[in-house]
Image: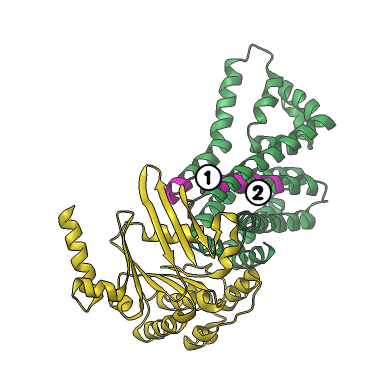
Chain colours: A green, B yellow
Amino acid sequence: MMQITKYLILNILKSRFMAAYALLLFLLSSGLFMLSNDQDKAIIGIHNVLLILIPLVVMIYSVSEIYNSTDFIRLLLTQPVKRKFIFFSQFISNTAVLLAIQLLPIVLSLILFSDGSYLMAMGSNIFFLTLIFSSISSFIAYKIDEKIKGIGMTIFLGIFFLAIYDGLVLLLIQAMSEYPIEQYGIVLCLFNPIDMCRILFIFKMDISALMGLTGAVMQKFVGSNLGSMIIHIVLCFWAIIPMSFAAKFFIKKDY
Amino acid sequence: MIHIQHLSKKYHQNQVLTNINLHLKKGMVAGLIGQNGTGKTTLIKCILGLTQFHEGDICINGESILNGPNYRKLIGYMAQVGRYPEKMQVAQLFEMMKQLRQSDATDTELWESFELHKIRHQYLGQLSGGTTQKVSAALAFMFNPEILILDEPTAGLDPIASEILKDKIKKESEHKLILITSHILNDLDEIASHVVFLQQGTLLFFETLEQLKIKSGHQKLGKTIAEIMLERSAIV
């Protein structure tokens, strides 16, 4: 398995897209630090950009990579290797490269321009977002045979998690504004990995105090060890469940 | 070597292969012939384990292929269209395959005849279609497998490379089983010893080339097959 992973990683690392994406992330994060006098504001800005960029880039890149390498995967499947090893080689190579390409420039700019206090929180969110959206894209790409349909579904899911889901939650909260539903807001967040990463990060910063009653309830939940643990466990499930289904589809797939 | 018993395969609701029974032995060069969409590629994919079948079994040297992927050590496969990672070098591809098969290259004849050492540091994404086919052919023969499955091997090759490959197939045929699909019947006429004819997912016949020519009264495989296809379409 490691042999395939090594050569696939080398192949992806040589692509111009990866170099351009890493450079863009570095310029973007460094630029935000340079433009803002307040370190916290710049970090929130970087985090907000990452919450949009990572899901979309990871999903579209991973899905395209899986579809484009179908012929090569077919060749690998004719070799004396178990299918699950080929699945994990492809999954690990795609995810590891994306993770490194996103982590390195952001971590570098945080080290260069900040006191490093949010390094772990930012790194953890980049890790979870990359892993989760790589799992979801594998699930889609191995389930749907047609490339156009697969990419379309990926874009829709990306937009759903980024905007549509939050819109629906806001509508619900508005409709139920006369009832004490703050604690249910937390439950609704568990169904969207982007929201979970957002609240994990926000409640590490002082700005959470400006978020009213909902913010106070969430602060109490996320601030507690149990709450933080629950969110991290749910994030792990968001990565493991789609990946398990993706592996199952890959093993049964007709190539 | 390859024993296919009562093999059937459906894609969704479409029956692609129906009750195929075939016994292919060492020393045969079997040309797999049939019109487009008759299940040739699906049959090859079933043997290679790329596609799962619903009924029947395929045994290689007496062991079912459902028992695991180890039987693929015995097979060299050349795809109709070889598409490789764009930024992988030719030498890296061969190195990776050696590591996957845990075997050294034992047959480098095609590697040398096609002069692939001259392009060993080129990226696979920069190669022309014909050169990519040369890489695929060299890779299929590289580990000296007992069974070779070649899907349209000469398509896209220049005349010189095509002749080199056909000579290699003839040379290897004495001690190997070679299964070839091709629409270039003149090529098959030169190299095949047997013909497997599929029609609408069923095995119409499996005969030696000589028997077939005697029956039809033609000396050319192309004419023989064209006549059979016309006859069958008239019946349908």
Mark linked to residue A130:
2
Q: From this view, report whether residue B63 is shown above or below residue A186.
A: below
Q: Quadrant of the N terminus of chain A?
A: bottom right
Q: Position of residue A128 (x, y in %)?
A: 70, 45
Circle 1 packing at 10 Å, graded few (<14), some (14-19), many (20+), is many
Q: Say which mark, if any, is on residue A140.
A: 1
User: CA–CA distance between discs 1 and 2?
Assistant: 15 Å
Name the side, left or right, on which A223 lies relative to B35: right
In depth, the one of B100 and B230 nearer the eye is: B230
x 47%, y 85%: residue: B114
In the displayed structure, does residue B165 sit left or right of residue B183? Answer: right
Please name the amino acid that badge 2 sits on: Thr
User: Does residue A23 appear in this view?
Assistant: yes
Is A130 one of the magenta-colored residues? Answer: yes
Residue sitting at x 37%, y 61% = B40
Label 2: how many residues lie within 10 Å, few (<14), some (14-19) or many (20+)?
many
Magenta region, residue range: A127-150
Q: Tag 2, which chain? A: A
- Report x, y in % for residue A169: 59, 25
The rendered magenta stretch, by its main secondary structure, is classed as helix
The disc labelled 1 sits on which kind of residue? Ile
The residue lying furthest to the top in this view is: A178
Q: Which residue is rendered at x = 66% and y = 12% of the image?
A: A179
Res A83 quadrant in image: bottom right
- Horizontal side, residue A39 vs residue B20: left or right: right
